[in-house]
């Protein structure tokens, strides 16, 4: 009974954290930019136009409210169904994950929209002067070797643990788990490489802001990589020791940790008050 | 240390790069042995073709201002500060002026010089 109670607290926290708390913080940041950087003075910040950006904000808010309501309905239904004895925790182990995917949708739309904005910024960029740092960028400018090594060691440790639970035999299940772990880390490596060596996403961004943003992204990648490894180890332990009743709780906690280490870390590390908005001014010709 | 290029400047981009890196070396903003960004990184940051940066790096390497150490990357040459003041173009102009004056004294015409120069250059 007490595991169910903890799960309800965790699931409720998942609903509030991902569909209320973080969206609220993001919306507050949007308001801060709208207030401090009006479209008439900072036209470069609104390549799609102020109205379109405002529409995006409203859509993001609306989506999160709808998802939160869906979550609360599911939450209440779960409590009632569980109270009536129609459902058991082990039957709903997929729920925190599936609902988490739904909760991630507005964040994904926001990311895609930001990428489109940057592309438009690059296309509209008519500055003839361009700047670059005369020093090479390396991974360790952004993330400490200890943190990076921990992520690598955790990856191998997790692979060994997963195989050891399977008596070092290759099976479909292990293949899928290792494959998804490789895919996840591979994605981070690819995105990290693009950040280090690729083109600037935001053509106006100052070098200092770029450094801060890249640091935040790399910290987030390494943290999530470590977390994924830990989660997979726990997941295998749960399966091996038949702790099915714990799975929904662990899945919910895992999903919240992912958001905490990605969105949470990004919001914490990139302070709006410290961003150089001068580069987005309508007549700004220099990038610093 | 930052470098700035102006794509509207009549001076070619590779020449702007060469000049700015030499200025940075002369002003000791980059020191001998300091690593430089890779061709790809600099090209991406400046949003120019990587061949342009490659050309600038080749000229700087020829002038012994920078040195490539294979997979380890490109570094500022140990003698870079002395070498960055050497102006090969100015030296070449003086050499040509002396040579042309000698040829003219010997009675060689401009067109003969042009044809011969072109032949010799093409044979090299």
Image (cartoon, rainbow, N blue to C red):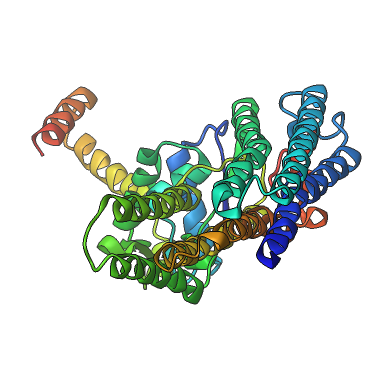
Quadrant assignment, res A205:
top right
- Measuring 58% from the left and 40% from the top, which residue is drawn there? A201
A222 up-or-down from A191: above or below: below
Please tell me which residue lies in front, A63 or B65: A63
- Measuring 86% from the left and 33% from the top, which residue is drawn there? A41
Can the viewer see residue A126?
no
Please tell me which residue lies in front, A27 or B58: A27
Quadrant assignment, res B113:
top left
- Is residue A78 found left or right of A238 in the rendered image? right
Can the viewer see residue B105?
yes
- Measuring 72% from the left and 38% from the top, which residue is drawn there? A285
Q: Position of residue A130 (x, y in %)?
A: 59, 42
Residue farthest along the bottom direction in this orientation: A146
A49 up-or-down from A149: above or below: above
Quadrant assignment, res A202:
top right
* Quarter of the image that includes the N terminus of chain A: bottom right
- Is residue A172 found left or right of B56 in the rendered image? left
Q: How many marks?
A: 0
- Measuring 55% from the left and 64% from the top, which residue is drawn there? A223
Residue farthest along the right direction in this orientation: A35
Residue farthest along the left direction in this orientation: B123
Q: Position of residue A36 (x, y in %)?
A: 89, 43
Q: Position of residue B124 (x, y in %)?
A: 10, 39
Q: Position of residue B25 (x, y in %)?
A: 49, 64
- Is residue B81 found left or right of A250 in the rendered image? left
Please tell me which residue lies in front, A41 or A83: A83
Please tell me which residue lies in front, A113 or A101: A101
A277 up-or-down from A135: above or below: above
């Amino acid at each position: 009974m007490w595991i169910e109670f903890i799960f309800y607290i965790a699931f409720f926290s998942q609903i509030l954290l991902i569909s209320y708390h973080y969206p609220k913080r993001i919306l507050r940041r949007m308001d801060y930019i709208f207030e401090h950087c009006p479209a008439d003075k900072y036209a470069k910040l609104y390549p799609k136009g102020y109205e379109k950006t405002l529409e995006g904000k409203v859509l993001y808010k609306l989506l999160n409210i709808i998802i939160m309501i869906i979550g609360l309905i599911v939450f209440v239904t779960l409590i009632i169904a569980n109270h009536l004895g129609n459902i058991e925790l082990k039957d709903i182990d997929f729920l925190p994950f599936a609902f988490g995917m739904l909760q991630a949708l507005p964040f994904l739309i926001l990311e895609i929209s930001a990428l489109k904005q940057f592309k438009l910024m690059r296309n509209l960029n008519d500055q003839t002067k361009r700047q670059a740092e005369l020093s090479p960028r390396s991974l360790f400018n952004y993330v400490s070797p200890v943190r990076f090594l921990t992520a690598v060691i955790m990856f191998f440790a997790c692979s060994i643990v997963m195989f050891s639970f399977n008596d070092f035999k290759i099976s479909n299940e292990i293949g899928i788990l290792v494959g998804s772990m490789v895919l996840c880390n591979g994605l981070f490596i690819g995105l990290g490489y693009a950040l280090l060596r690729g083109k600037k996403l935001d053509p106006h961004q100052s070098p200092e802001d770029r450094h801060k943003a890249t640091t935040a992204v790399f910290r987030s990648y390494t943290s999530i990589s470590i977390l994924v490894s830990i989660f997979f180890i726990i997941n295998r332990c749960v399966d091996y020791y038949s702790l099915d009743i714990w799975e929904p709780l662990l899945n919910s906690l895992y999903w919240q940790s992912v958001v905490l280490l990605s969105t949470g870390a990004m919001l914490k590390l990139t302070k709006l008050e410290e961003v150089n908005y001068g580069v987005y001014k309508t007549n700004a010709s220099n990038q610093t | 240390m930052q470098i700035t290029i102006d794509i509207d400047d009549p001076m070619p981009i590779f020449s702007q790069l060469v000049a700015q890196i030499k200025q940075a070396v002369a002003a000791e903003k980059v020191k001998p042995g300091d690593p430089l960004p890779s061709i790809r990184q600099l090209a991406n940051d400046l949003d120019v073709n990587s061949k342009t940066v490659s050309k600038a790096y080749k000229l700087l390497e020829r002038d012994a201002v920078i040195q490539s150490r294979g997979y380890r990357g490109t570094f500022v040459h140990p003698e870079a500060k002395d070498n960055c003041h050497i102006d090969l173009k100015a030296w070449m102009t003086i050499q040509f002026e002396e040579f042309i004056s000698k040829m003219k004294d010997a009675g060689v015409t401009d067109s003969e010089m042009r044809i011969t120069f072109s032949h010799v250059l093409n044979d090299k």
